[in-house]
Image (tube, rainbow, N blue to C red):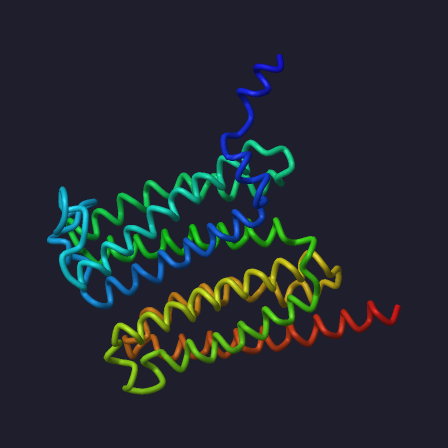
Amino acid sequence: MSTDSRSLRPVVRPLIDRFGFPQLLATTLVLVAATILLGVAAKATGSGLACEANWPQCDAGPYNLLPANLPSFYEWFHRFVAMFAGFAIVGSALAAWRLPTVDRRVARLVVLGMILTPIQVVLGRETVLQYEMTILSLHFWTAVLIFVLFVVATVLVWQSKLTSAHAVVALAVGVVALALHVALSPVVGTATVNYSPTMQLVQYGVTLTLLGSTIVAAMVVRDRFEDRLTVASALATPPLVVAVLFFGRRAVNPALEVPYLILAAVLLVAFLVSVRFVRSASSTRSNA
């Protein structure tokens, strides 16, 4: 019986014992976000095919494993970080599934992220071999879905330490990120229409910040408050963010500029209303 118990112990247990599962999950989330931004950098600089359309090899060194020039380095480094992100995703999923102390909701989320990872790898390969817009779009949105899964899982793990103050901060970050998202969109001015590599990288960084902060705020408010209006206002923000991001990616089309701006305005109102409700509910609770 003891032998069976030892055989069932997670192989990642020594690592978990040393650093903790919440830290492992947070690190995985950072790696996922970094992979997305590096992918944007590779695409923005036109480096997606810089490794001479080789995958997973590149275009220099033994067995073409290393980059030959700066454009190749962008693509190679994206793959390099993605490899570690993949290992972290698999490790997080195995640890979550096998550790009895981990919430089963968290386990299901990170296991789904692990299932999506090989699909994302295949899509990444196809962006090199075919480089079609449909594949590029699927590659991006699959990465965003994995990012969302790990944001939700990370918040669930750290939820006991998150307070209403964290929700207000997350909503404030969302307001700032939304303003930047609109400012960097082609709707505001011609300066951003050219979409330099730096501009694209900043815009997608803002996109991830907007999405992540909104999820954090909605989850903390739902966990900490019982007032229906407070919870409803916060829960309305994530779907609005998704709609803003969807139309924002297509705002280069003049016909979609007005829907984008309307959705952004509605989202701003939802953020401000949520801040008001959360602060009011917090004040009422403290005075009770």
Image vertical order of residue 198 relative to residue 10, above or below = below
Question: In terms of image quadrants, where is residue 163?
Answer: bottom right
Please give the name of the residue rendered at 40% of the width and 82% of the height, measured from the top-left corner.
Answer: 183
Image quarter hosting the N terminus: top right
Please give the name of the residue rendered at 56% of the width and 52% of the height, measured from the top-left corner.
Answer: 154
Residue closer to the observer: 89 or 118: 89
Residue 124: x and y in percent read 26, 49
Identify the residue at the far right of this view: 288
Image vertical order of residue 3 relative to residue 278, above or below = above
Q: Is residue 221 rendered to the left or right of residue 174?
A: right
Residue closer to the observer: 263 or 218: 218
Question: In terms of image quadrants, where is residue 196?
Answer: bottom left
Q: Is residue 28 rendered to the left or right of residue 77?
A: right
Residue 121: x and y in percent read 29, 45
Please give the name of the residue rendered at 55% of the width and 23% of the height, measured from the top-left corner.
Answer: 8
Residue closer to the observer: 201 or 283: 201
Residue 90: x and y in percent read 43, 39
Q: Is residue 143 rendered to the left or right of residue 29?
A: left
Residue 262: x and y in percent read 45, 78
Identify the residue at the far top of this view: 1
Question: In terms of image quadrants, where is residue 282?
Answer: bottom right
How many discs appear? 0
Image quarter hosting the C terminus: bottom right
